[in-house]
Image (cartoon, rainbow, N blue to C red):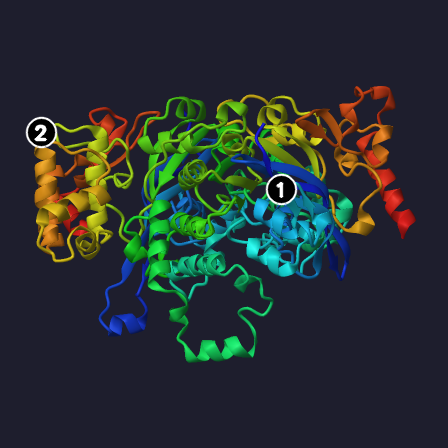
Amino acid sequence: MTEPLLAVRDLQKYYFEQDSFVDSLLGRDPTSVKAVDGISFEVERGETLGLVGESGCGKSTTGETLLRLREATGGAVTFDGANVFEMDDDELKAFRRDAQIVFQDPFSSLDPRMTVGDIVAEPLKIHGIPESADGESKREWRRDKVADLLERVGLSANHLDRYPHEFSGGQRQRIGIARALALEPDFIVLDEPVSALDVSVQAQVLNLLDDLQSEFGLTYLFIAHDLSVVRHICDRVAVMYLGNVVELGPTDELFESPKHPYTKALLESVPRPSTAEHGRRVEALSGDVPSPRNPPSGCRFRTRCPQVIPPDDLDIEQGTYRSVMDLRDALAVGDVNPDHIWDAADPDRADTEAFIEEARARHVDAELRGEVAGVVDTALGHLAEGEADRAGETLRERFESPCETRRPAVGEAPHPAACHLYEGSDEVTVIETNAGAAAEADD
Amino acid sequence: MADTILSVRDLSTRFFTEEGQVNAVESVSFDVEDGEIFGIVGESGSGKSVTALSVIDLIESPGRVTQGEIWYRNADLAEEFRGSKPEAVDGDLVDIRRLPKGVRRSLRGPSFSMVFQDPMSSFNPSITVGEQIAEAVEVQRRARSNPRSTRSRTQGYGLGSLLVDSLLPSKSYVDDESMDRAVELLDQVGIPDPEDRAEEYPHQFSGGMLQRAMIAQALAGEPDILIADEPTTALDVTIQAQILNLLRDLQEQEGMSILMITHDLGVIARMCDRVGVMYAGEVVERGPLADIFDNPVHPYTQGLLGSIPDVDDPSGRLEPISGNVPSLLDSEMPDACYFADRCPKAMTDCLTRIPEYELDGRHSVRCVLAEQEYDPADAVDSADAADAVDREVNADD
């Protein structure tokens, strides 16, 4: 197998809050937002790798960090054999000729005071191209080159002297693509290139990207949230969730037999434009994506996962276990307020039985039986006495999942999934974290 | 067949801007039946949101609804105006455009209410979510106890209310009963721990939670028709699935009708019973879901369906519609089918204005192909059509 064009290893990008000089004087510790937290993938020459995920999962940060538009916190990116993060200025400038980016918003990524000709010619100017032009001035050479590029992306050469506001969204995105092509790069990061466009125009741009790839032998990193677009254009796909890659595989395989519960839920949620879709009820994932300021310990997806793994020695139905885990999460984030439960159950705050019953009605979706009911009731008893921490601890002791103590990452298999369900195969590697740290993170 | 709760006929809305007259909505007609979800789908600038705002009478200057009738079934109103405004009453239906302004305003809440696209900018950031919902409840309660109170033109304005506002703290507007109802509504839309969340401000909510809160607010008046304008466009797909489930549940529980506006054909397919496809301010095709998706007649509808990549079947190249969405400036709009310059099947007949053809009782389309087969001999090249349009425009100058 040939060497990949781009290899990303354990890339991390943290943003820090409270780390100004004043904060350090006041003795505040900086808090980190883990936008990208240790991801690895490779992009082969000539392929399109899709990076897909919901907003806030770190996909755009990944694209910008690997081009060194943002400084990475850790990890390494190798492009064509050279480590991007260790390049000096000259090497970096050379790297920028080979790797370009197209941004999402065609309205804010073009300078409104430059003509289209100047916008597309700017990269050429910066990189001193052409070094020499025979028979004509460099300016004329660039003008011809830009006219050529504009025609290549489906605009006309007499658009050269117009300004961006004279173009529609789709046409502006074409200008952005022409600018990225100007330096004849090998690799382009396409950061949501069609998500600001209407469907009819989106299809035109997708077809254009397809054509350009086969004409110039380009390699794409295609960042998107729209799964149907990803399916259409990508050869392989990496699914991201909260700063991690959870599944990586060839597009058809990943869409037809997804492995990670998150990928399954994502695919299940997409509304299909066909009559068979009518009235289809999706088992929606519960809750919201947690904050990257304080991500869940272990598997990042465990707070919403419908297949979260119960402890070995516990006999419990999956649905029941999910609702117990939801109760634990709600306790951890302070979504359970004993005062309101008391108000509804017994304003005199005497009848603990009534409190437990009311709390179960409000916060536990499933029927509880046997040992599970016993432990939950004990915990809710603690809650009734105002000891929320002890309630959480009681539940943790009995219901702690392997998903929260150890963190999974994608393994070496061709189609790996970072999920404990696949433990024991080469699809997942487990990063051990100790249980104590996990409990601390929960607080 | 279910009864019609809302029947929009020949509705046009214009914006009189400095650049000229914009024909945002052009002779739009559609019906919404009891307990159904009617979808309006179109690209940006096709006039779908303006249509919704026209129905709920929220078009602001420089815009104006210039013609059309909006028939709404309400026996009480029909009874009330049968004597004084016979032209506005037809059986149980009233034409709300002909009712007095105060009455039209009183319909917002108990008759129509609206869920907007961007929950983050639709709430007041300096008032708690609970209070904003309770305010909606309060308005409806006062309206019910004294229907005339919300019909007064000066309500909420003027010297009297200025004095009242400055003397009484603004909180007193919302009493405990309304606040309790707000908490109930938050609970109904699936917000955990509603008592505490009601005390929080919009920025403390996630996008999905805030969209739920906005739905709760829209439910406060127990509306007959909920207008949902791109309710899930700002949300991620897993959260979108939650909100769509919620809307369907509420629609079944409350028995209301929903007018669903979206650009996403997938959302239309999952939710809607009947659909209208809008292009350049017109409803170009309208009918039951199956007719529109499996048997589209208008080339624009076909083009729209052909432009979407299929998540289950990646094979094949997309077949986009060429060209761009047209300008809606009156001076630039041709006396021809608005789609002719992009249409792969444009014929000479398309260079005149096209009426709406009924295919069968339920499916109608604004295209000559409804009546005749495509005849390549009669074709005008789309470029020619564009030229014809240009000539037309220049002739107008």
Mark 1 on the same chain as mark 2: no
Q: Is residue A376 above or below residue A234?
A: below
Binning the other alpha carbons within 10 Å of mark 2 as few (below 14), some (14 to 19) or many (20 upward) gives few
Q: Quadrant of the N terminus of chain B?
A: top right
Q: Report x, y in % for residue A13.
A: 35, 51
The amino acid type, in three-letter code, at marker 1 is Asp
Q: Is residue A148 above or below residue B350?
A: below
Name the one closer to the observer, B370 or B264. B370
The amino acid type, in three-letter code, at marker 2 is Asp
Q: Kindly indicate the quadrant of the structure image that contains residue B261.
A: top right
Where is mark 1, residue-wise? B92
Label 1 to label 2: alpha-carbon separation:
66 Å
In the displayed structure, does residue A365 sit left or right of residue B326? left
Q: Report x, y in % for residue A111.
A: 62, 58
Q: Which mark is residue A131?
A: none
Q: Chain of mark 1?
A: B
Q: Kindly indicate the quadrant of the structure image that contains residue A195.
A: top right
Q: Report x, y in % for residue B239.
A: 40, 41
Where is mark 2, residue-wise? A313
Q: Is residue A141 visible?
A: no
**C-beta proximity under 8 Å, tags 1 and 2:** no
Q: Secondary structure at mark 2?
A: loop
Q: Report x, y in % for residue A394.
A: 9, 45
**Outermost residue, front side:** B83
Q: Chain of mark 2?
A: A
In the displayed structure, does residue A269 sit left or right of residue B70? left
Which residue is drawn at the image coordinates 18% and 46% (left, top)? A359
Q: Is residue A312 above or below residue A137?
A: above
Q: Kindly indicate the quadrant of the structure image that contains residue B73.
A: top right
Name the one closer to the observer, A238 or B27. B27
